[in-house]
Amino acid sequence: MKGTLRAVAALLLGAALLLGAAAGAAFPDVPAGAWYEAVVDEMAEKGLLTGYPDGNFHPEDTISAAQLVTIAARCAGAEPASAGDHWAGAAMEQALQNGWYDWDELPPTGERWDEPIPRQLAVKILMKALLPGAGYDFNRDSARLKDFSSLNGRYYETTLSAVAAGVVTGDGEGNFRPLDGLIRAEACALFRRALSAAGGVTPQPPAETERPSVPAVPSAKGGVTENGWLQVVGTQLCNARGEPIVLHGMSSHGLQWYGQYASAQAMANTAAYGANVFRVAMYTGEGGYLSQPEAMTERAFAAVDAAIQADLYAILDWHILSDGDPMANVAAAESFFAAAAERYKDTPNVLYEICNEPNGNVTWAGNVKPYAQWLVSAIRAQAPKSVILIGSPTWSQDIHQAAADPVAGENLMYTLHFYAGTHGQELRQRIDAAMAAGLPVFVSEWGASRADGSGGVFLEESKVWLDFLGERGVSWCNWSLCDKNETSAALKPGTAPAGSWTEDDLTESGRFVFSRF
């Protein structure tokens, strides 16, 4: 944010962008003496909000995502990135680039922009825009919301920081109602409180936390022949001799769509550039395992066998996505991993990633941890020492929850996923905090694009991320080895899966990632 928010408000005085109407000191449908009269008039006078073409404000109407983001952009002084077909397209694009929301919360295709925005997401956007450095005390501030347990863990930090800053107070009964919408008058009140909280000092982004102490880590090199069975020592992945090792490599895209790039030749090509790991992404939904278990098992095992042939470590990934709750198909997962563990029990190459990205209304304690305990037991019955990777809620971003209540067992690691165009310092801080608490972290999926696989390529942000991971000895796999027409793909459209690849076959993302093996 540039300068104080009072200065921003002054610069915006008289602006009239929302829905094309002119701002005024009052609106005909804002009754004198209404609880929101003063705040609505004040924000209108500063040009931070305007009315509809009919001259009214409609204070009791539910605010849409586009309306709320537009007001947030004005309050923060954000310059629109570009125009689009939608009246709020520029503000929505800028807010996405700024990290105020993620693509899956409000897809850039715009189908949710004009829908009522859930309260928990509205508060996240507001806090990211105006008070990004606000802190909180979990025990104290969570106790202030009577219905805190109904809040999605994805929104803990922004909601609790809003409570601590006095932006959110709950209703008359102390409830936050995280999934409900906001009326426009109430949204104005929240913005006014945030502006007031930020008015004295311009908030600064939180500093990177000090990195935890980890052993000196060599550059990623050598495959299975050199390093043998992997083991987890403290927070560090180590080889059979107990020496720190980092794995760098690629993830396939869905085998049902791009299985040709998980062939023996593709593995050999990737290894030739210096990779020592390959992640086999076997989707469960989207026409994957749950639709055709025998065919997808055969493809997954063939890909693992190809990785073994190339002397690569192989991550066998149960790639949940649309089926966001891992417990929903726990029996199928147990059957698959039991068969896989039996097949590869004497093979040091294979790691097991048991739940790609839990999402939706799932919790660590209620869904992911019980599932993980179940699957760890099933795998350990056949493969007692293989490394097992465990995801967390919110698309494997809530590793702080796993750090507070880890799964019992040895040679377990916890995955974190990021996309450089969407995720930044906040998730890096989570990694540091988790490792400081003793949690071993493995970044089993990251992309140089935005989280939807498009946008960018964000090379500077990717470099910051990979330097950060390298300093901490954290292993990673990049999304994805395929020729899909999206910026996260490593191969140009039409790249032949057979034959070796040159740099001319690699996309901008592919060239960068391959150079970091």
Image: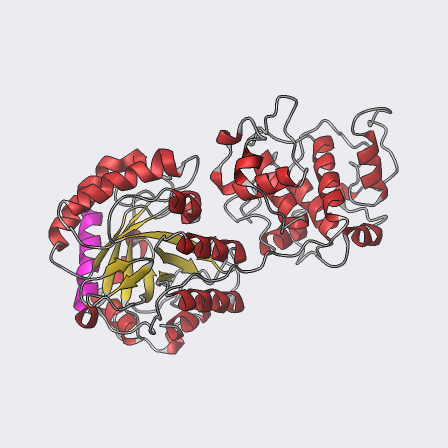
- Relative to residue 81, is residue 312 depicted above or below? below
Front in this rendered view, residue 153 or 210: 210
At 45% across and 57% down in the image, what residue appears?
Answer: 432
Q: In this view, does 130 lie to the left or right of 430?
A: right
Magenta stretch: give its range.
Answer: 293-309
Q: Where is residue 306 in the image (x, y as percent from the top left)?
A: 19, 64
Front in this rendered view, residue 501 or 227: 227
Q: Where is residue 387 in the image (x, y as percent from the top left)?
A: 24, 55
Task: Identify the residue at the far top of this view.
Answer: 173
At 70% across and 28% down in the image, what residue appears?
Answer: 61
**For residue 504: magenta?**
no
Instruction: Specify the quadrant of the image occupied by residue 305.
Output: bottom left
User: From this viewpoint, is residue 481 visible?
Assistant: no
Q: Is residue 439 left or right of residue 317?
A: right
Q: In this view, does 422 lie to the left or right of 394?
A: right
User: From this viewpoint, is residue 81 visible?
Assistant: yes
Q: Where is residue 201 in the image (x, y as percent from the top left)?
A: 74, 53
Quadrant where the N terminus sits is: bottom right
At 23% across and 63% down in the image, what residue appears?
Answer: 313
At 66% across and 58% down in the image, what residue appears?
Answer: 81
- Relative to residue 200, is residue 303 depicted above or below? below
